[in-house]
Image (cartoon, rainbow, N blue to C red):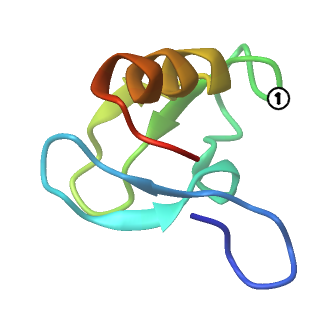
């Protein structure tokens, strides 16, 4: 799910279900800022690891979905 024009992927929080632009939510105070794949939900502050492209591809392959 891409935002219009920018190519930023919209992410859904696994805890609260809130949707937000993935990269825009990266906390600047994180020691790994810019290189980690950890996201922080702006709605509930839950931190989670962003799903990789490979993980999504394998999930679609196992569930028989076409991209």
Say if 28 sits above or below 23 in the image: above
Where's the N terminus, which quadrant?
bottom right
Residue at 26% in and 64% down: 18
Q: Residue furthest bottom?
A: 4
Say if 5 sits above or below 35 in the image: below
Residue 54: image x %, image y %?
A: 63, 16
Residue 23: image x %, image y %?
A: 69, 50
Residue 56: image x %, image y %?
A: 50, 27
Say if 20 sits above or below 3 in the image: above
Reading the image, the residue beneath label 1 is 34
In the image, 29 versus 38, the foreground residue is 38
Residue 34 appears in which quarter of the rendering?
A: top right
Residue at 60% in and 22% down: 52
Q: Is residue 5 left or right of residue 37?
A: right
In the image, 1 versus 37, the foreground residue is 1
Q: Is residue 5 left or right of residue 26?
A: right
């Amino acid at each position: 799910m891409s935002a219009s024009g920018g190519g930023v992927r919209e992410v859904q929080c696994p805890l609260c279900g809130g949707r937000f632009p993935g990269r825009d939510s990266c906390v600047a105070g994180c020691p790994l800022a810019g290189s980690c794949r950890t996201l922080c939900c702006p709605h509930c502050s839950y931190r989670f690891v962003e799903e990789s492209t490979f993980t999504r591809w394998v999930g679609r392959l196992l569930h028989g979905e076409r991209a």
